[in-house]
Image (cartoon, grey):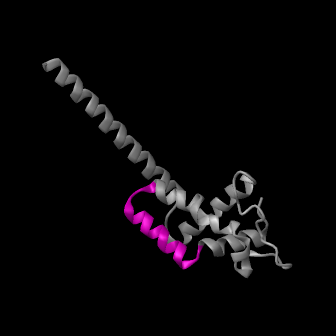
Amino acid sequence: MLTDPEREALRRWYAQPQLLERVQELRDTGVPEDLEEYLHKLCLFPLGKHDQLPDWMRTEDGKPLFESGLNPLTDEEKWQDAVEVGWEVMEAELGLSHDDIHRAIADEQQDEWASFLASVNARKREREQS
């Protein structure tokens, strides 16, 4: 579970203009899996570079707020909490929710399945005609 200072630092992290711009770019590409991967993984990678962290991502004594760098292999619970904070920020800043992305992924998968079934049926008809 995140502390209040950790939660606030993550809100600030996810609300950085360059991060929000990247999320908008990814939303515009129409590949929801890429956007989800960015928010869940790629934008958190810099937190593991402790020597490059801004002061607001450090404790009062200068240590990183997230010693694990929010690596899910090290601390899955904190990572999950961090991802939730990220989605809260995306909804507040960009009107984009995790549910929206899940729906888009499900729609995409349904379309792919329908295309697959159509191609199977087309091949079946071709064989029957041969």
Q: How far from the left and from the top, in percent, is residue 70?
A: 71, 61
Number of marks in the image? Answer: 0
Quarter of the picture holding the C terminus:
top left
Q: Is residue 73 above or below residue 28?
A: above
Q: Which quarter of the rendered picture does the N terminus lie within?
A: bottom right
**Is 72 one of the magenta-colored residues?**
no
**Where 13 sits versus 26, above or below?**
below
Q: Is residue 28 magenta?
A: yes
**How far across and how far down the image is residue 11, in percent?**
65, 72
- The residue under the point 32% across, 35% down is 116
Identity of the residue furthest to the left in this view: 129
Q: Is residue 2 above or below residue 72?
A: below
Residue 125 placement, left or right of 99: left
x 23%, y 27%: residue: 123
- Expressed as whole percent of the image width and height from the top left, the position of residue 24 reads 45, 69
Q: Which residues are magenta?
A: 15-32
Quarter occupied by residue 12: bottom right
Left or right: 119 with respect to 54? left
- Which residue appears at 77% of the width and 76% of the height? 58
Of 51 and 126, nearer the camera is 51
Residue sticking out furthest to the bottom: 55
Which residue: 44% across, 64% down?
Answer: 26
| Magenta stretch: dominant secondary structure | helix
